[in-house]
Image: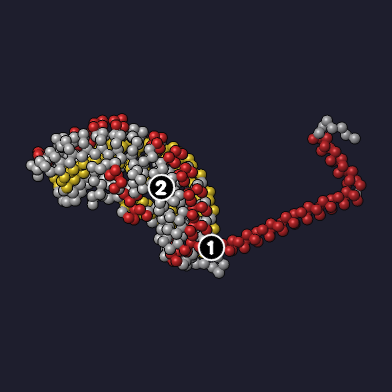
Amino acid sequence: MGEMKQLSFLDLSHNHFSGELPYQLTIGCISLEELRLSNNHFRGNIPKFSNFTKLSQLFVNNNNLNCTLKEVLENLNGEELMAVDISNNSISGSIPSTIAKWSRVWVLLMGNNQLEGEIPIEFSNLVMLFVLDLSQNKLFGSISLLNPSILTFLYLQKNDFSGSIPLGFFESSSLTTLDLRDNNFSGNIPYMIERLSNLRVLLLGGNNFVGHIPIQLCQLPKITIIDLSRNKLKGSIPSCFNNISFGIKENYDSSAQTVAFSTVLLNSPIESAVNASVSLFMPSIDYQNDDINAAVEVRTKNNIYTYKGFILEKMTGLDLSCNMLRGSIPFQIGDMQKVRVLNLSHNYLSGSIPNTFSNLAQIESLDLSYNNLSGEIPFQMVKLNNLAIFNVSFNNLSGVAPSTGQFGTFVENSYLGNPFLCAELLTHTCEASPPSQLNHIEGKETMIDMGAFYWTFISSYIVILMGFTTVLCINASWRMTWFYFIAKIIHTCFPTLPLY
């Protein structure tokens, strides 16, 4: 193969090749434009491909390469490179300043390696970046040096980045996916987030964000998945969330700058996947290869699941769990008829479960556990035929849990920690009068007892006052003694007041 001077495309991916990458390819394949060696067992370093002046696409992801990123850069001619995928290897070291020579790269995937250090200032020269994946490394510091001019897919999850989200990110109307999960970002979620008019996926979970949930999130017209879990957000849940269509509208603008959600890339490994509309920007790059996996990792149904393909288009979710949110659940949340995953667990929410939750026709996973919710589980929720996971454990719920429809399939763990809640599947069976009704009756008795107490107190006071007045009227000596006593008290309290 190394002598095939006219060879322009070579795909050896998805095999069981091992050993070092074949250096023989560097001998004569001077016309190579695209090289795919991904999903094998290659190790070592990338051969010296510096003579490949036409190489525009390189895919060596999902191997065992164990060199440094500096060595990779030294062995590649970056003048024509437009797509580079070295993710899911053991490539180590810091990001060198020579990264600037990849100034024409559109897709750069380096996730799930052992990269460390800060993002160098030379990274700002990569002004053509369309897709960037630096996830699951050991990078730290600020991300202000990233150039968001045309960035559409950005994956920085599972690193040690800190600071606030740079305001420059909100000047990019092209950003579609923003994944900053499991870092050390802090500060408030910027109100300028409303400017990201094309944003479909917002993943900020597992950071140190504080303050209130900005109502500007409700103004994102194409959002489908919001993850704000595991932060330090406080205040109440915005009632305007019902304004979010969660991305599912029949008449979205399909202009050249709209990237279909069926190709959203959320997790590493990402094998360079973008919809055909991207070809308007990058006609020389083929992103319709069968290797392409558009995968989304979503925490739902008590686990983490990956969604891709057609299913991914239908996936919608809101996760506000593990924060410090208080107040009642807005009844408007029940108007989010397209949401499939709703997680409000591990907060300080109070009040009752809104009856409007019966309108969540598409809901598959509903987690309200570890809050201070009270009252009964709305019986109308038995209409939720798609509900597979339901958890209201460790609240203060009472009454009889529904047992028909999907509620007949839930196990005892769904209701634990609610001592006044009864159901057939629980260890304590329902009495003739449900606890909620007993509490209601007890409440009435308490109100009657308090009324009797007030009337008794007033009557006793009147009787004592009248008896005392009668005694003073009958006995003159007692009456004079009482008046003398009152006069002495007045003189003690007001010595300047004259006595008559």
Which of the image's four quarters has the N terminus?
top left
In percent of width and height, residue 230 lies at 41, 46
Secondary structure under the numbered disc 1 in the rendered image: strand
* Mark 2 neighbour class, 10 Å CA radius: few under 14, some 14 to 19, many 20 or more: many
Which residue appears at 30% of the width and 50% of the height? 294
Asked if the residue under mark 1 is in contact with the one under mark 2, i.e. CB atoms within 8 Å, the reply is no
Residue 10 at least partly seen = yes
| Residue 326 located left or right of residue 109 | right
Please tell me whether residue 179 is drawn above or below residue 454 in the rendered image.
Answer: above
Work out whether residue 449 or residue 97 is closer to the camera in this orientation and state it: 97
State the residue position of label 1.
Answer: 399
- Quadrant of the rendered structure where residue 186 is? top left
Q: Residue furthest bottom?
A: 432
In percent of width and height, residue 216 lies at 47, 42
Q: Residue furthest left?
A: 3
Work out whether residue 196 or residue 322 is closer to the camera in this orientation and state it: 196
- Quadrant of the rendered structure where residue 34 is? top left
Which residue appears at 15% of the width and 46% of the height? 10
Residue 2 at least partly seen = no
In percent of width and height, residue 44 lies at 16, 41
Secondary structure under the numbered disc 2 in the rendered image: loop
Circle nearer the viewer, 2 or 1: 2
Which numbered disc, 2 or 1, marks the residue that appears first in the sequence?
2
Which of the image's four quarters has the C terminus?
top right
Residue type marked 2: Lys
Kindly identify which numbered label has been placed on residue 222: 2
In percent of width and height, residue 124 lies at 31, 32
